[in-house]
Every structure is written in structure tokens, then in C-alpha cells.
Image (cartoon, rainbow, N blue to C red):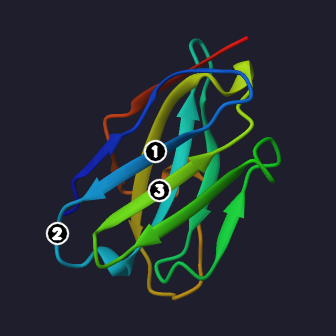
Amino acid sequence: QVQLVESGGGLVQAGGSLRLSCAASGRTFSSYAMGWFRQAPGKERDFVAAISRSGRSTYYADSVKGRFSVSRDNAQNAVYLQMNSLKPEDTAVYYCAAVSSPYDSNWYVRRYEYDYWGQGTQVTVSS
């Protein structure tokens, strides 16, 4: 069982930056691949970024590639999402998610692949 708690959301102007954090409970964090998703009002929850359990492999949605960066610290049981050059269309509730992975370098992009979810943190980008 893994419990996830996101933090770091807020209000920022377009072009600004935010760093989201996701703190995980449990002693087996390094066995979980992690992902970030976001959901804007009236829209589906969409994939943003994923990172393998080792942290050596990452993958991004086209909409955030080159602007966002995902990382993790297995010693601290945490995963991060650095968001730069933010746009108003990045406004959403951001969720982190975890899935137990048998492979060191695999990442996952589909919602149904993830077993555990945080409660979300609001990111609002003003124009």
C-alpha cells in the first residue's frame, strides 16, 4: 500500500515556474514507477510525465516536453515535477500516481495502469 500526498501548487503568472512534490509513504517506494497527471475543469485526467522506479527513464506528454521535468529521490520517498514556462492552458489539478513495476526502466502513461493516486494539488496560471 502506498499513500501519496502532493504539494507545491499555487497561482503563478504565465512564463513562471512551479515545483510540485509528491511524498510517498511506505518502505518500498523504489519499487514503484511514478507518474504525473492533470485534470482541468470539465476535461479528462490526462497524462503529463512518468518516471521509472530507478529514475533513469522518463517520458513526457508532447504538450509539456521541454518545459516540465520529472525527477525522484528514492531515499526521500519523493517525486517531483519542475514546471517552467507555464502557460494558462497548464491550469489544472495535478495528481501523482504510483504503480508497482517489476522493471527498472519502465514508465507508464495510461491512467488504468496506476494503482495509487494522491488527492491532487491545484495549479493556476494567469495570463
Residue toward you, 18 or 124: 18
Taking the image as shown, residue 6 lies to the left or right of residue 53, namely left
Amino acid, disc 1: Leu
Left-right relation of 3 to 29:
left
- Alpha-carbon span between mark 2 and mark 3: 17 Å
As helix, strand or loop, the secondary structure at mark 1 comes to strand
Indicate which disc residue 80 carries. Answer: 3
| Dot label at residue 26 | 2
At x 47% / y 56%, what residue is drawn?
80
Q: Position of residue 91 (x, y in %)?
A: 61, 22
Category of crowding for the residue at label 3, using alpha-carbon neighbours closer than 10 angstroms: few (below 14), some (14–19), many (at least 20):
many
Label pair 1/3, CB-CB below 8 angstroms = yes
Residue 52: give x, y in percent of width and height. 54, 75
Mark 2 and mark 1 in contact? Answer it, CB < 8 Å: no
Label located before the other in sequence (2 or 1)? 1
Q: Name the residue under label 1.
A: 20
The residue lying at 45 percent from left, 69 percent from top is 72
